[in-house]
Image (cartoon, rainbow, N blue to C red):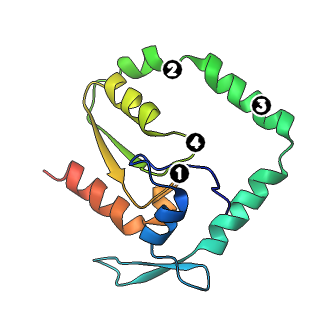
Amino acid sequence: MNFAGCRCSDGTSTASWQARAGLSADGRRLVHGQAHGDKILDLRFLAGLAKDASAMPAARWRAILDEIRRAGLTTAAQGVRTQTLIIAGACDPLFGDEHQQALSRCLAEASLVRAEACGHNPHWEDPAFVARAITGAFET
């Protein structure tokens, strides 16, 4: 996966993020899980997803992004009146800190949890972290 030029929320480069993420020489990352023991996340899986997304014509991506911009979901988000958990990657090259904070402000009862060693897909990059965040946020 190529994140060249991307920056994490703390201003570090994505090369630094990859080092913090503990990438192994064979392109895999050890993910520690409490309930299920240690797991290995094969980053080649994520690379395959990126390859598939890259195969989509640029015009289609532009059309999708235009629809997202036109959707104007701010008003709808402001109408949400329930506990909401936002799990965001600190090194997300698509939706950075400013976007994450704006989403958090729009949702009245939102909690923003930052996955510091993750990019756009914390649920794949660190599923144990995501599981702990969900459990911690909604346990009563």
| Residue 93 x/y as whole percent | 56, 46
- The Cα atoms of the two marked residues, 4 and 3, are separated by 14 Å
Q: Quadrant of the N terminus?
A: bottom right
* N-terminal label among 2 and 4: 2
Q: Is residue 12 left or right of residue 128?
A: right
- Per the image, label 4 sits on a secondary structure element best described as loop
Separation of residues labelled 2 and 1 (CA atoms): 20 Å
Q: Label 3: how many residues lie within 10 Å, few (<14), some (14-19) or many (20+)? A: few
Where does label 2 land, which residue? 73
The residue at which mark 1 appears reads as 120
For the residues marked 1 and 3, what is the alpha-carbon distance in whole angstroms? 19 Å
Q: Residue at x 69, y 23 (%)?
A: 67
Say if mark 1 contacts mark 3, CB within 8 Å: no
Residue 10, percent across and down? 38, 49
Of the residues under marks 4 and 3, which one precedes in the sequence? 3
Q: For mark 4, what is the residue?
A: 94
Q: Which amino acid, mark 3?
A: Arg
Q: With 3 as the anchor, is 77 left or right in this view? A: left
Q: Earlier in the sequence, mark 1 or mark 3?
A: 3
**Circle 4 Cα neighbour tier, 10 Å, few/some/many (<14 / 14–19 / ≥20):** few
Assess whether mark 4 and mark 1 are in contact (beta carbons under 8 angstroms): yes
* Residue neighbourhood size for the residue with mark 1, other residues' Cα within 10 Å, grouped as few (<14), some (14–19), many (≥20): some
- Give the residue type at disc 2: Leu
Q: Looking at numbered disc 1 in the image, what kind of residue is underneath it?
A: His
Find disc 3 in the rendering and name its residue.
62
User: For the residue carrying disc 2, how many other residues have a C-alpha within 10 Å: few (<14), some (14-19), or many (20+)?
Assistant: few
Residue 20: percent from left, percent from top: 42, 69
Q: Is residue 60 above or below residue 69?
A: below
